[in-house]
Amino acid sequence: MDKHSPVTLSPRLRDENQTVTQWVYQSLRRAVMDGDFLPGRQLTIRALAQMLDVSPMPVREALRQLAAENALTILGNRRVMVPQMTAMKFTELCEARIAIECHAAARALPYIDSAQLQALRQQDAAINTAQDSGNLAQINHHNQEFHRLMYSANPHQVSLPLIESLWLQLGPFMRLASNSISEHYLVDRHSEAMQAIERKDAVALQLAIAADIRDGVAFANNPSNYKALSTTQTASSFHSFFLPPWQKSLHEQHSRRIHSPEISSSFSISNKNA
Amino acid sequence: MDKHSPVTLSPRLRDENQTVTQWVYQSLRRAVMDGDFLPGRQLTIRALAQMLDVSPMPVREALRQLAAENALTILGNRRVMVPQMTAMKFTELCEARIAIECHAAARALPYIDSAQLQALRQQDAAINTAQDSGNLAQINHHNQEFHRLMYSANPHQVSLPLIESLWLQLGPFMRLASNSISEHYLVDRHSEAMQAIERKDAVALQLAIAADIRDGVAFANNPSNYKALSTTQTASSFHSFFLPPWQKSLHEQHSRRIHSPEISSSFSISNKNA
DNA sequence: TTTATATTTTTGTGATCACAATATACTTTC
DNA sequence: GAAAGTATATTGTGATCACAAAAATATAAA
């Protein structure tokens, strides 16, 4: 149990014409997504209010908003805490990500024109530079932005909020797992995705997205991270016995982000380890 | 634009040891899900507070919570309104429902034992009796409860909140469309689903769920409802030309809920029109 | 040292208020 | 009569406060 670990909160810069509640909300949301709050951490309104130098009111509303997105859990005693992660829940979250994000990608595909493809390439380049710097949080941000960019090409898209809810729920634990990994470069599934987009191949796009998500979580869903998790809580382990019957050989283990040699094309971005 | 239509709000009965905010939240949530607020309706904190005889504070938090679930939209002028429906958004919501609910059903399947299957049968019976009474809202409730029951058999399930968010977004419009339909009985896909569960056949279960969802919205996604929609707003129509390229012949038209003759089995519940 | 009880402190909740922004109603002007 | 400007009313926002519930601490008993 980690109810009272020290918390550092780096507030986002306060935008013009945005309410205090919105600002608090985004600051807290970012903190959750980046894993600044450890799972099991209990949050008090007054403490956060003091940190952000605002009255308790906006914090109350922001916390309630995040709880509605399943980013935080409201306990029976009406206190708010960062949800605990279990191995089963982790698997469910990842599989839900795959199901929804593949769907969102396929729905977005018809709307992705060359301009948006170009934007995707730029975002992918940003991921590579972030990878050179080794800043895990930044890699994560740019990676999310890549996915967000793709899905929101669909102007009538409705699933991005659901997807972000899943990202929020994974956030606190991914950070925890990341700490035990010095580096985690992945096969460049984004190149595969962008090639599928060029060919307007929905199936290939979905395969690339699914692989990207599995790669992204493979390093976390690993027995070596079980230790990191158990130090804070959670009785269940991360071994593979818990995989449901219909789900076989789920987690490949990749250690470096490289281009699959057979699919590198003219518009793929070069990578330091390629 | 329907910003000021009269609104009747039937508060839920106030439970013991539940906060005022929770009570207000559930009352408003139920109202949205049942379509008591028409799309485009603008909601004011003070008016709702007066209706429910509480201070504006709990209403504020409840509205913000519902907005976080995408049940309500916060406008630029910081006012809250029931989201408008467009044909494209409607399609996206339905397809998202199919993608996520099929996924949730498959993930729940291994956990559904005979006791839970029995509960599903009872819930399906409740749907049939509600159908005899002709109460559309009640049919809707029991139908949702059937789906909820199935998905939450998975003890580590994470997608139900996402699914409910979609239900909330469809609520205001489904009611609107329902009004223009005197009766809409469907092929009893629930029987098909329960048979698939008995056989532990994940693919068949997913097909049944997808068909159930498509049936449930087929009567709404119909040119005859375009009139009902256009009287309140929304320029786009409900014809099928907008279907994305990969989505062909989506909406069958069923008018009565009957058992598919070839699949009726010993444990299916008899239906008044069977 | 451990367990039970009493006291103090902290916390969430919900109401009220002041204020600025927005919407509505009214007046004026062309 | 329609458009533009002004005045009034309404609304969301955020701070403050009182209160009850819960947690933390202190105290007493085994």
Image: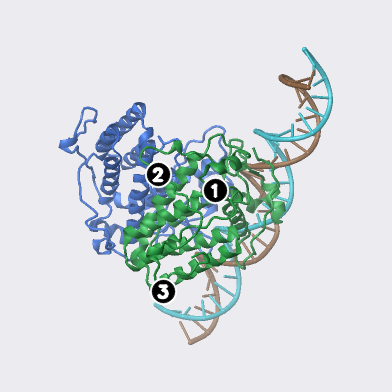
Chain colours: A blue, B green, C cyan, D brown
| Dot 3: chain letter | B
Note whether residue A86 is visible: no
Q: Residue at x 69, y 56 (%)?
A: B52
The residue carrying mark 2 is B249
Disc 1 and disc 3 in contact, CB within 8 angstroms: no
Q: How crowded is mark 3: few (under 14 residues within 10 Å), some or many (20 or more)?
A: few
Which element type, helix, strand or loop, lies under badge 1? Answer: loop
Disc 2 and disc 3 in contact, CB within 8 angstroms: no
The residue carrying mark 3 is B115
- Give the CA distance from mark 1 to mark 3: 33 Å
Disc 1 and disc 2 in contact, CB within 8 angstroms: no
Q: Which of marks 1 and 3 is in front?
A: 3
The residue carrying mark 1 is B71
First reached walking from the N terminus: tag 2 or tag 3 = 3
User: Residue A15, relative to residue B172: is it above or below?
Assistant: above
User: Residue A74, relative to residue B180: is it above or below?
Assistant: below
Note whether residue A229 is visible: yes
Q: Is A124 on the left-hand or right-hand side of D4?
A: left
Q: Nearer the viewer, mark 1 or mark 2?
A: 2
Which element type, helix, strand or loop, lies under badge 2? Answer: loop
Which amino acid, by three-letter code, is at mark 2?
A: Ser
